[in-house]
Image (cartoon, rainbow, N blue to C red):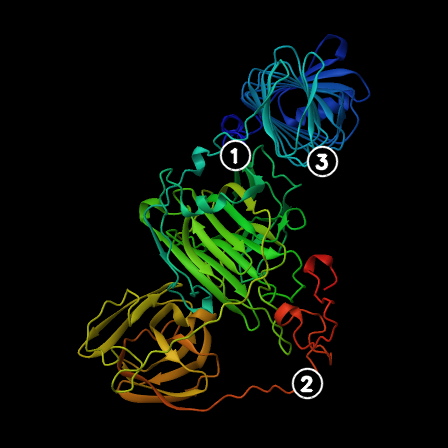
């Protein structure tokens, strides 16, 4: 927003109010002459319109403090007067005039034809809809604040503040004597403002100014743009690039990132604020009005279980997607069906094909629901998912995800590659500042070769190392897949394979994903001539006995909740405890949970060399016969298994178990040994001791570099000019000294 005063008056938190139609029973009252009718409900309005169809008439709608009406399709020679403290009118028909007398908020959505609109006394007005022709709107209210998202010819009889958004390009403003107009033109075209003496001035695209009655244009674009709702201090946060879940759930990983801290200056700007000084605001939605702006957003429709085994169906319903009090509200709805089963609906919206961006700073301010099984998200997907291949090859940027059962922890993630890989960071806040009770800002800065995540202006994750490849073909030139246009998504999932599922403690009617605004900033230009960082993996040495496991004999009773050496984890309904005593790790299970990793003991930072051969040994027994799963994973690489999941049959007598494997992946300094005890047939306690990982040898893994027919049947390598340096991998160029060769960019549409 380019003007603080204007923003405070128009305010995202003020433009819309809850509008519930009164259901006071009454019969339409016909005045003498049959031309004036008074109604108090939508049903009565429909009846009145049928009664007067083809006749000149005036219909007055009074329905208490809050009035919401819809004028159905049809042609009516009527003037409709709406009286109420808050008023919302949807017009789908053709009417002579709409007159609104309100002391509060007025929202008019015109999808039909209106010859004239008159607004009296209102403080805030929003005018939207899919009409193409400018509608004359007479505003007779003192210091009224307006937001236009549809074409209108405004006649201001008193001082007015107007924000013009996309859709209002054909608008114009006329000020009568002594009326002043404060104008913020966010459209892509100039807007004309005519004053009382006939002088016409232009307000250019992106310009914010005040037009005085004397024809003076005062620039207001330099005024303070900071709204109170943006003033989040980012305090009491813990940032962490190593989260505590398991690969099977996708709940955690780590990238090469650094913890974030607040950068303080004399003006107390955060690190993200400093960053944005080189940016320009390109698009925003403050969710003003009472309807979702369909010119900006698509509503997605998906069946239950479409992805991630989620419970909800995504629908287009006012019950699930609302704009109210300056907020977007995505609500879960639980329905008890006739057969006693329960079904769930929710909302998912995106900007695909309407607002797509390549690079930028993407931010929303939101408050999440609380309850087991909820997963709200603010994220991005490529506009053309086929450019580099379907997910995950196409790439995905998750700016924010928060689990409803753990609302003090947020996740930021990218997905990419084939095989699937990811990088994830987390941000944890204290209980009083959690993401469900307080609004927070969530953002990512996406630049060529680097993506950085922020919460309340504090950096908590950064990544530059990724790739895109198709099986049987080469790797696409960096920084693919994050070098193409993406669009934004807001949704609320109910249940899923990662977050888990609702239980009896989960409530629905009182929960919502509330979004205050979405903003996109971009720089004037970006340098895409970037190179993939060279990863220098340093593998630590084992201890003097050759063991890569720290405290493998459990001689130290260490803290099992920190990130040093051994760590005990529970998730997805798992409940238990672990303790070191008598040189044993004893793991007790109260509730086995719904996944093998619901009860889990791990040790990360196990160094593994490509080609290395390793031996894993440990002693183990259980209080009664049972099984567990052991493996070694790569948490920095989507928990790919270096040593496959191995079922271990445990008896009641201590037994030594020995396994061997070869590291076939790239060198990894952060392999993770895992013992998974969840979702088993028994909850019997397990005893572990003498855990060792030793390197037994090395066998070079030679890559087959001979050319073969590619997976798509092509004999030409890099025929799509997407691989290698300058996208010219495999090609030898012979040319005169004064000739140049280059591969065109993605934007030309030929690749």
Q: Mark 2: give few (<14), some (14-19) or many (20+) Cα within 10 Å.
A: few
Q: Measure the C-alpha gap from mark 2 to mark 3.
A: 55 Å
Q: Which quadrant of the figure has residue 251?
A: bottom left
Q: Mark 3 highlights which residue? A: 130
- Residue 750: image x %, image y %? 75, 62
Residue 166, relative to residue 553: is it above or below? above
Mark sitting earlier along the chain (1/3): 3
- Residue 690: image x %, image y %? 26, 84
Q: Residue at x 72, y 66 (%)?
A: 740
- Residue 714: image x %, image y %? 73, 78
- Kind of element beneath mark 3: loop
Q: Quadrant of the C terminus?
A: bottom right
Mark sitting earlier along the chain (2/3): 3
Q: Mark 1 highlights which residue? A: 326
Mark sitting earlier along the chain (1/2): 1
Label of residue 53 in the image: none
Is 737 displayed left or right of 453 in the figure? Answer: right
Q: Residue at x 71, y 62 (%)?
A: 744
The single residue placed furthest to the right in the displayed view is 54
Q: Nearer the viewer, mark 1 or mark 2?
A: 2
Q: Residue at x 72, y 14 (%)?
A: 198
- Kind of element beneath mark 1: loop
The single residue placed furthest to the left in the displayed view is 582
Is 173 displayed left or right of 361 in the figure? Answer: right
Camera-nearest residue between 266 and 333: 266
Q: Mark 2 highlights which residue? A: 708
Camera-nearest residue between 114 and 707: 707
């Amino acid at each position: 927003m380019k003007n603080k005063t204007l923003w405070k008056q128009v305010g995202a938190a003020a433009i819309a109010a809850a509008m519930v139609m009164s259901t006071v029973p009454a019969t339409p009252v016909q005045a003498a002459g049959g031309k004036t009718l008074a109604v108090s409900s939508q049903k009565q309005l429909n009846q009145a319109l049928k009664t007067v169809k083809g006749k000149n008439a005036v219909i007055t709608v009074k329905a208490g403090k809050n009035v919401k009406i819809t004028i159905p399709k049809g042609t009516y020679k009527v003037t409709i007067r709406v009286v109420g403290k808050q008023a919302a009118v949807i017009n789908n028909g053709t009417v002579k005039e709409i007159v609104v007398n309100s002391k509060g908020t007025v929202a008019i959505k015109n999808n039909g034809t209106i010859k004239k609109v008159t607004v009296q006394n209102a403080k805030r007005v929003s005018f939207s809809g899919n009409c193409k022709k400018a509608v004359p709107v007479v505003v007779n209210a003192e210091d009224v604040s307006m937001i236009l998202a549809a074409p209108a010819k405004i006649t201001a009889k008193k001082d007015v503040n107007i924000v013009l958004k996309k859709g209002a390009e054909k608008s114009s403003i006329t000020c009568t004597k002594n009326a002043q107009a404060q104008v913020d033109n966010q459209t892509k075209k100039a807007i004309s403002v005519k004053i009382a003496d006939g002088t016409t001035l232009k307000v250019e695209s992106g310009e914010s100014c005040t037009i005085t009655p004397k024809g003076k244009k005062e620039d207001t674009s330099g005024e303070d743009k900071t709204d109170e709702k943006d003033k989040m201090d980012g305090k009491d946060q813990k940032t962490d690039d190593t989260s505590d879940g398991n690969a099977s759930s996708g709940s955690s990983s780590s990238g090469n990132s650094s913890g974030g801290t607040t950068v303080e200056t004399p003006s107390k700007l955060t690190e993200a604020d400093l960053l944005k000084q080189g940016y320009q605001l390109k698009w925003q939605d403050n969710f003003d009005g009472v309807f979702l702006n369909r010119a900006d957003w698509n509503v997605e429709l998906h069946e239950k279980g479409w992805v991630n085994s989620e419970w909800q169906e995504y629908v287009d319903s006012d019950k699930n997607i609302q704009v109210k009090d300056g907020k977007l509200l995505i609500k879960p709805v639980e329905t008890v069906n006739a057969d006693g089963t329960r079904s769930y609906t929710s909302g998912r919206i995106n900007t695909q094909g309407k607002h797509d961006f390549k690079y930028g700073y993407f931010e929303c301010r939101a408050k999440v629901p609380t309850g087991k099984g909820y997963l709200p998200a603010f994220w991005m997907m490529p506009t053309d998912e086929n450019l580099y291949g379907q997910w995950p090859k196409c790439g995905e940027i998750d700016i924010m995800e928060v689990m409803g059962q753990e609302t003090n922890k947020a996740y930021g993630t990218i997905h990419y590659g084939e095989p699937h890989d990811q990088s994830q960071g987390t941000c944890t806040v204290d209980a009083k500042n959690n993401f469900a009770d307080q609004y927070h800002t969530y953002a990512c800065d996406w630049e060529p070769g680097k993506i950085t995540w922020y919460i309340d202006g504090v950096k908590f994750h950064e990544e530059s190392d990724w790739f895109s490849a198709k099986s049987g073909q080469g790797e696409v030139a960096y920084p693919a897949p994050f070098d193409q246009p993406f669009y934004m998504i807001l949704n609320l999932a109910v249940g899923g394979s990662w977050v888990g599922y609702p239980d009896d403690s989960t409530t629905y009617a009182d929960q919502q994903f509330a979004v205050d605004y979405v903003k996109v900033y971009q720089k004037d230009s970006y340098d895409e001539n970037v190179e993939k960082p060279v990863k220098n993996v340093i593998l630590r040495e084992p201890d003097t006995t050759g063991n890569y496991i720290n405290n493998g004999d459990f001689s130290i009773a260490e803290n099992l909740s920190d990130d040093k050496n051994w760590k005990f984890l529970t998730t997805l309904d798992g409940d238990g405890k672990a303790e070191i005593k008598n040189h044993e790790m004893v793991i007790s299970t109260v509730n086995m949970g719904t996944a093998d990793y619901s009860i889990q003991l791990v040790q990360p930072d196990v160094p593994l060399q490509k080609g290395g051969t390793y031996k894993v040994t440990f002693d183990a027994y259980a209080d009664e016969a049972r099984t567990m799963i052991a493996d070694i994973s790569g948490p920095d690489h989507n928990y790919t298994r270096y040593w496959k999941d191995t079922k271990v049959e445990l008896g009641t007598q201590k037994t030594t178990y020995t396994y061997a494997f070869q590291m076939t992946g790239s060198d990894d300094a952060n392999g993770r040994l895992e013992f998974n005890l969840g979702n088993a047939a028994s909850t019997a306690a397990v005893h572990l001791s003498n855990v060792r990982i030793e390197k037994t040898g090395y066998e070079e893994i030679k890559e087959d570099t001979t050319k073969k027919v590619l997976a798509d049947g092509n004999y030409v390598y890099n025929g799509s000019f997407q691989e290698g340096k300058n996208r010219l991998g495999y090609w030898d160029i012979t040319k005169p000294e004064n000739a140049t060769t280059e591969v065109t960019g993605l934007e030309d549409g030929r690749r």
